[in-house]
Amino acid sequence: MPEVQPTPIRPYTIFASAVMVLFSPLLAMSYFATKDGAQMYATGSVRAWAKPARSLFEPMLTFASADRVYATYSLLIALVIPALPLAAWAVRRARLPVAGTFERRASWVVAAAWTIFSGSLFVVAVALQVKPANTSGNSVVNVVFLAGMIPSLVIGCLGSAPLGVSLLRHGFLPRIAGLIITLALPLWIACTFAFGHNSIGITTQMIAWTLALSAVMKRTGADVPLRSGLTG
């Protein structure tokens, strides 16, 4: 496998985390303006934050049709989300000398799941560029969403719980990273229902893996090559 240097990975993950924090709410608000997202906007907790936020950021949500704006932010998120599996693979590779069999297997499942998720999201985002209107009626979006994004998202979140527990039990620092990874599933569910879009919940995992990558780089040295881990 080609080697992936942590030196460029870390700035990319930091940049990706910042983009996710700043633009996931915009992606959510743009979704609420579409035909498919209107029902979610009717939820009380969603309207509580989305209505004033939309008034504040209206120019960033009305530069094109509602479907085109949503497609644009979807592509932006799709371009930075690969930082999540890259960080997961890099952390896994760095911990191979100290990780037990369980952690190695769990980290492989989680990293592989996020890889499939990021690839599926990119396909969906590209499909939306071609046909942004009527997302639910786009056959490509439906197939990839149901066959790729949802299963990989669920597996990634479910696998993160035992992986995070293992990291915490072995004293992984910062502990907040291990805790957020452990709580991937409840955080995703809570954020999706409270804020109306799953990208906000996934942002928590991006931040956690960025912190984890920064931590292992400090221990191993930024000049140590970390392979993707796909064969380990």
Image: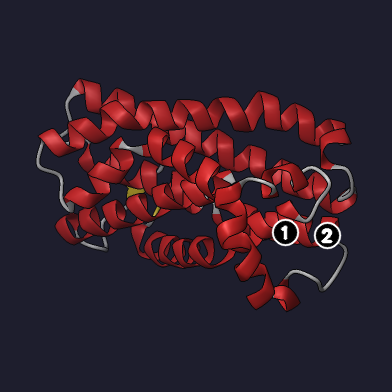
In the picture, measured across the screen, residue 41 lies left or right of residue 99, that is right
Report the residue at 57% width, 58% height from top: 48
Residue 66: numbered disc: 2
Disc 2, SS = helix
Q: In which quarter of the image is residue 65?
A: bottom right
Location of the N terminus (image quadrant): top left
Q: Residue 155: x percent and y percent?
A: 47, 25
Closer to the N terminus: mark 1 or mark 2?
A: 1
Question: Is residue 232 at all visible to an observer of this figure?
Answer: no
Report the residue at 78% width, 30% height from top: 142
Q: Residue 203: x percent and y percent?
A: 47, 52
From what the image shows, is residue 61 above or below residue 208?
Answer: below
| Total labels drawn | 2
From what the image shows, is residue 206 above or below residue 228?
Answer: below
Front-most of residues 135 and 112? 135
Q: Residue 201: x percent and y percent?
A: 48, 46
Q: Residue 178: x percent and y percent?
A: 24, 43
Q: Quadrant of residue 67?
A: bottom right
From what the image shows, is residue 42 above or below residue 141?
Answer: below
- Contact, mark 1 vs mark 2 (Cβ under 8 Å): yes
Residue 61: numbered disc: none
Report the residue at 38% width, 42% height from top: 89
The amino acid type of the residue labelled 1 equals Ser
The amino acid type of the residue labelled 2 equals Ala
Badge 1: residue crowd in 10 Å (few <14, some 14–19, many ≥20):
many
Badge 2: residue crowd in 10 Å (few <14, some 14–19, many ≥20):
many
